[in-house]
Image (tube, grey):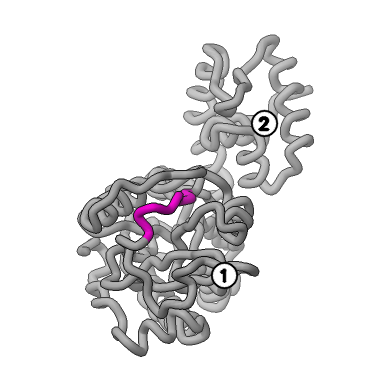
Amino acid sequence: MDLEVRHLRAVCAIADHGSISKAAAALKTPQPSLAAQLRRIESMFGSALFERGREGARPTALGAWVLARSRSLLPAFEELRRDGMRYAGRRLVRVGCMSSHLAVHVIRTLRELLPDAEVSMRTEEAMDVLPSLLRSQRLELATLADYPGRALVPPPGVGYTPVAHEPIFVGLSASHPLAGRAEVELADLAGEEWSLPVMIEVGHREHFAEACAAAGFVPRIGCEATLSVAVDLIAASRCVGMFQATSRGYPGIVIRPLAGTPLRFRHLIGWTEAGPVDPQVGGLVAAVRRAYWADAGDTPAYRSWLGRHGPLPQPQTDAHSAPV
């Protein structure tokens, strides 16, 4: 077997995500296929590239060496492909998305604004990797989020612009004693176990801990799970969890606002200033904002909350700054 670019991408994905299963999901490849591919790559090199255990996949000494070389080579291949497409008169827009409802609107708007571009998308369970992918020009566009007191600052050559501030709601079992309230006091959840995502971006956990401390308690993290597992646990009254206000809900779960809005975050769009998106940023952001507020109006819990409180203060429109 000859070593190919896709093999280098597979090795980097496993290292970036910490496990074969998460890397397979990101690469949109069946896990058994990626595991078999890794075995063939390791056979080619003559030794294991990763140590597999309960905590996931960790690079061996050989794996770390291969990773370092792969990370230096892949940008060159990406640049070759990108420049080749430009030479042929085609545009490439690679989009990285955090787990939010903006992704669909961003992709749809891009295809309207740049109908001749090749648009591809990758999703990340945690968005911490996205700024570095923008900085290295491995992405042209990304949806991001930050939290009060922890504003993201764009790296050189990258622009950020805010879309909207959004409150964070709580998800409870439909049979929970607080499920009938229009709004739930965070302090009333002091005795609950909480579910947090397995991978969570910098700022979210700290913002949550600070809000709980202000409410007079230290949260008990009962589980760290993927969304599909977390919703089952919440519906079964095993824990409670945080949800975006634009969430449409899940069977057996009610999503309620938190009184006083102690938890919130900000949607951002990031892009490479030398890429094809830069001239279209104004139109893109305006369209995504319209779609976001249309979604808000179609979400009963959020629509009701907005009727009582109005929108959170809207971000400034300076496309290169990141104010809170």
Q: For the point 39% across and 56% down, which residue is it?
A: 272
- Give amino acid for label 1: Ala
Q: Which residue is mark 2?
A: 7
Secondary-structure class at tag 1: loop
Residue 163 to residue 78: above or below: below
Judge by depth and name the residue closer to the eye, 10 or 60: 60
Mark 1 touches mark 2? (CB < 8 Å): no
Judge by depth and name the residue closer to the eye, 184 or 308: 184
Residue stretch in magenta: 189-196
> First in sequence: mark 1 or mark 2?
2
- Give amino acid for label 2: His
Where is residue 44 shown, x and y percent of the image? 72, 16
Classify mark 2: residues with Cα within 10 Å, few (<14), some (14-19) or many (20+): some
Where is residue 37 shown, x and y percent of the image? 75, 29
Residue 86 to residue 312: above or below: above
Secondary-structure class at tag 2: helix
Answer left or right for 90 relative to 220.
Answer: right
Classify mark 1: residues with Cα within 10 Å, few (<14), some (14-19) or many (20+): some
Where is residue 116 shown, x and y percent of the image? 60, 70
Q: Is residue 94 visible?
A: yes
Q: Is residue 122 visible?
A: no
Q: Is residue 193 magenta?
A: yes
Judge by depth and name the residue closer to the eye, 118 or 212: 212
Badge number at residue 26? none
Q: Which residue is mark 1?
A: 174
Answer left or right for 163 relative to 80.
Answer: left
> Which residue is the extreme one toward the front?
177
